[in-house]
């Protein structure tokens, strides 16, 4: 589990609440992975 070096929010908290503490939180490996899964899982590119 990672912790943001800037605001101190843990990746667990972010994944649980869905809210990041600051822009640095996005750099946590768990958050990057979660965002990647979110956007990479289902891609609908229209017709
Ligand atoms: Zn942060």
Image: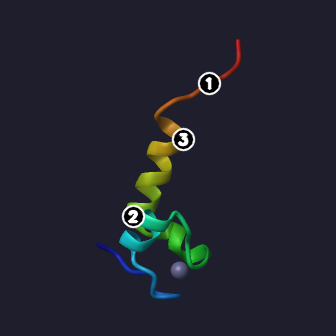
Residue at disc 2, secondary structure: helix
- Eyeballing the image, is 16 above or below 13? above
Report, in whole angstroms, how far the alpha carbon at label 3 lies from the one at label 2: 15 Å
Q: Residues within 10 Å of mark 2 (few under 14, many from 20)?
A: some
Distance from mark 2 CB to nearest ligand 1 atom below 8 Å: no
Residue at disc 3, secondary structure: helix
Quarter of the image with the N terminus in it: bottom left
Q: Is residue 42 left or right of residue 10?
A: right
On residue 29, the disc is 2
Point out residue 29 in the picture as x, y percentages from the top left corner. 39, 64
Reading the image, the residue beneath label 3 is 39
Residue pictured at 52% horizontal, 73% vertical: 25
Reading the image, the residue beneath label 1 is 44
Report, in whole angstroms, how far the alpha carbon at label 3 lies from the one at label 1: 10 Å
Residue reaching furthest left?
1
Which of the 4 quarters of the picture holds residue 5? bottom left
Residue at disc 1, secondary structure: loop
Of circles 2 and 1, which is in front? Answer: 1
Mark 2 vs 1: CB contact within 8 A: no
Residue pictured at 57% horizontal, 28% vertical: 43
Mark 3 vs 2: CB contact within 8 A: no
- Eyeballing the image, is 41 above or below 17? above
Residue pictured at 45% horizontal, 82% vertical: 9
């Amino acid at each position: 589990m990672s912790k943001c070096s800037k605001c101190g929010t843990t990746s667990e908290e972010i994944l649980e609440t869905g809210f990041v503490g600051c822009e640095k939180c996005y750099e946590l490996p768990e958050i990057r992975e979660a965002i990647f899964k979110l956007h990479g899982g289902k891609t609908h590119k229209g017709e």
